[in-house]
Amino acid sequence: MKLLRVGTAGSERPALLDAEGILRDLSGVVPDIDGALLADDAALGRVRAAAESGELPVLDADGLRVGPPLARIGKIVCIGLNYHDHARETGAEPPAEPVIFFKAADTVVGPDDTVLVPRGSLKTDWEVELAVVIGRTARYLESHDEALARVAGYAVAHDVSEREFQIERGGTWDKGKNCETFNPLGPWLVTADEVSDPQDLLLKLWVNGELKQGGTTAEQIFSVAEVVRYVSQFMTLYPGDVINTGTPAGVALGQPEPKPYLRAGDVVELEIGGLGRQRQEFKPA
């Protein structure tokens, strides 16, 4: 299923994109799309049955804002330097273990919402990423099969980053990762049963119409299953948590000088095969 949330920011309603590409209202079936829903087999069964019935009310998509596909996100765990080609372009050694950092849940916005260039920023960068949405509690997992069984679905994430704040201002990466609007998510939460192999997904990103990133999750250093298993050794993952699994080559940081960092007025578009497409205009904070 392709689950999404539509409406003005803070007042989104749950919806579903059916097999014919028709937007349908789920608000009469479930109150929202969140961790509680993803952990409730009976509720998901009602959603699936309603979708298959073809009787859900149709929504007019014209002019209707698409919000983040997941409400009340618990935490966003991010994996750094997780693509072989991205490590090469930045001159970094592939890590021996996954590099973990966090983004606050309040960085999440809709897939087509405005992204704000922070005040004083000179090095705002783009990163298309596969987001993994957790649907079952995960702690101390032992196998990849156990890990994938905890995944409710997948989504497109844009891990916007400010490289000066991240790398040159001391401390950890958090200052360059948690600026407001720095995690567009969606348009859909695609349930795991529709993604036969999370290591066979194409990722692309354009800046002002120019292709900058074109990669595949086959290039991941640590697979989705390994990332979920590994993270569960250090923290408990709960339904509604999100893992951003890293970005392929092509970011501004990896380009020759002068590096083409983002400025107000730029437009970024990104997509992952089968998971949908985003478009953001960048404006000053």
Image (cartoon, helix red, strand yellow):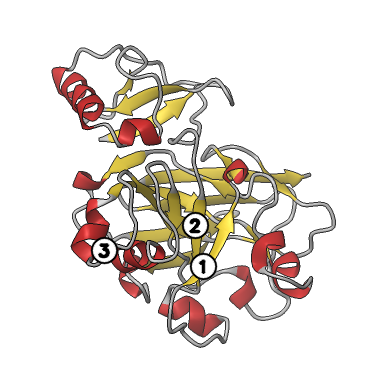
Residue at the spot 32% in from the left edge and 43% down from the top edge:
135
Label 1 sits on a secondary structure element that is: strand
In this orientation, which residue lies closer to the viewer: 263 or 253?
253
User: Which x, y percent locates residue 272?
Assistant: 38, 53
> Relative to residue 160, is residue 128 drawn left or right?
left
Q: Which mark is residue 100?
A: 1
* Residue receiving disc 3: 200
From this view, report whether residue 106 is shown above or below residue 232. above
Label 2 sits on a secondary structure element that is: strand
User: Which x, y percent locates residue 101?
Assistant: 56, 64
Q: Name the residue type under label 2.
A: Val
User: Which x, y percent locates residue 60?
Assistant: 40, 16
Q: Which mark is residue 77?
A: 2
Image quadrant where residue 125 sits: bottom right
Disc with the residue nearer the chain's start (1 vs 3): 1
Image quadrant where residue 219 sits: bottom left
Dot 1: within a 10 Å radius of its alpha carbon, few (fewer than 14), some, or many (20 or more) residues? some
Q: Are marks 2 and 1 in contact (CB under 8 Å)?
A: yes
CA distance for labels 1 and 3: 23 Å
